């Protein structure tokens, strides 16, 4: 289990070298799938959602990630519509607001992991849905002009689902004993701290 924690931290570190919205020059499906994977803010949030669902257990293992992905797809459609329509004159303001919301999701999800099941499930699902909406809008706003919108949406949805599954695996194996559970909660704490750093680095 300790290897899962180390692997998670390892990927997080090297993902930070890419930073959010940087190396996504390919178009279509590949560009969509790389967006949540190469952005440290998206990456941490996606994995955290999977971890939290595993911590809660039961139907939450599929219900929470499914809720996130479905609402994220709606947000993605909204973001893509904005990007294609040109009917908004304050893109910088919108992008900044969405980015702040995403970073807040990293902070709050990290706190939720460190608290481990002390937040009511209904509250968790509501916030997961809100976070999914903003992550989806961010994906849509970052769609390259040459990309096929359908393939791009399919790509970022697939990338998100993969990261959720990765997080579920981490959460499941980490909750098998006290030591690994403690390490996971500590990782959640540092995830929140890193989110605070990102917030002040904007």
Image: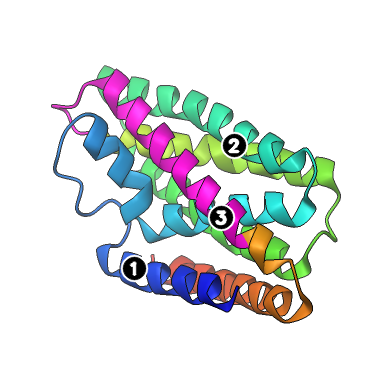
Indicate whether 85 appears above or below 61: above
Give the residues in magenta.
144-170
Q: Mark 3 falls on what kind of element?
A: helix
Q: What residue is drawn where x is 60% and y is 50%?
A: 50
Report the side of 81 relative to 2 (left or right).
Answer: left
- Residue that mark 1 sits on: 16
Question: Is 165 within the magenta?
Answer: yes
Choose between 64 and 57: the one closer to the eye. Answer: 57
Mark 3 and mark 1 lie on one chain; the one further toward the N terminus is 1
Asked whether residue 88 is in view, the answer is no
Q: Is mark 2 on a helix, strand or loop?
A: helix
Task: Estimate the x, y position of residue 117 in percent, counting from the top left.
Answer: 82, 59
Nearer to the camera, 108 or 173: 173
Image location (x, y in percent) of residue 169: 58, 55
In the foreground, 170 or 104: 170
Circle 3 or circle 2, nearest the eye: 3
Residue that mark 3 sits on: 167
Image quarter hosting the N terminus:
bottom right
Q: From the image, tell me which residue sits under label 2.
A: 68
CB under 8 Å between callouts 2 and 1?
no
């Amino acid at each position: 289990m300790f290897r899962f924690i180390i692997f998670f931290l390892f990927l997080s570190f090297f993902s930070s070298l890419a930073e959010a919205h940087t190396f996504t020059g390919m178009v279509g499906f590949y560009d969509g799938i790389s967006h949540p994977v190469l952005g440290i803010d998206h990456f941490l949030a996606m994995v955290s959602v999977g971890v939290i669902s595993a911590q809660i257990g039961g139907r939450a293992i599929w219900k929470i990630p499914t809720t996130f992905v479905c609402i994220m797809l709606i947000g993605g459609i909204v973001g893509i519509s904005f990007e294609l329509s040109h009917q908004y004159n304050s893109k910088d303001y919108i992008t900044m607001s969405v980015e702040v919301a995403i970073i807040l999701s990293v902070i709050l999800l990290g706190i939720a992991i460190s608290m481990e099941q002390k937040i009511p499930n209904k509250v968790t699902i509501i916030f997961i849905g809100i976070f999914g909406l903003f992550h989806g809008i961010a994906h849509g706003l970052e769609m390259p002009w040459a990309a096929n919108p359908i393939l791009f949406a399919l790509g970022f949805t697939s990338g998100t689902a993969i990261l959720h599954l990765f997080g579920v695996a981490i959460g499941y194996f980490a909750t098998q004993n006290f030591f690994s559970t403690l390490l996971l909660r500590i990782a959640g704490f540092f995830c929140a701290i890193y989110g605070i750093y990102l917030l002040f680095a904007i």
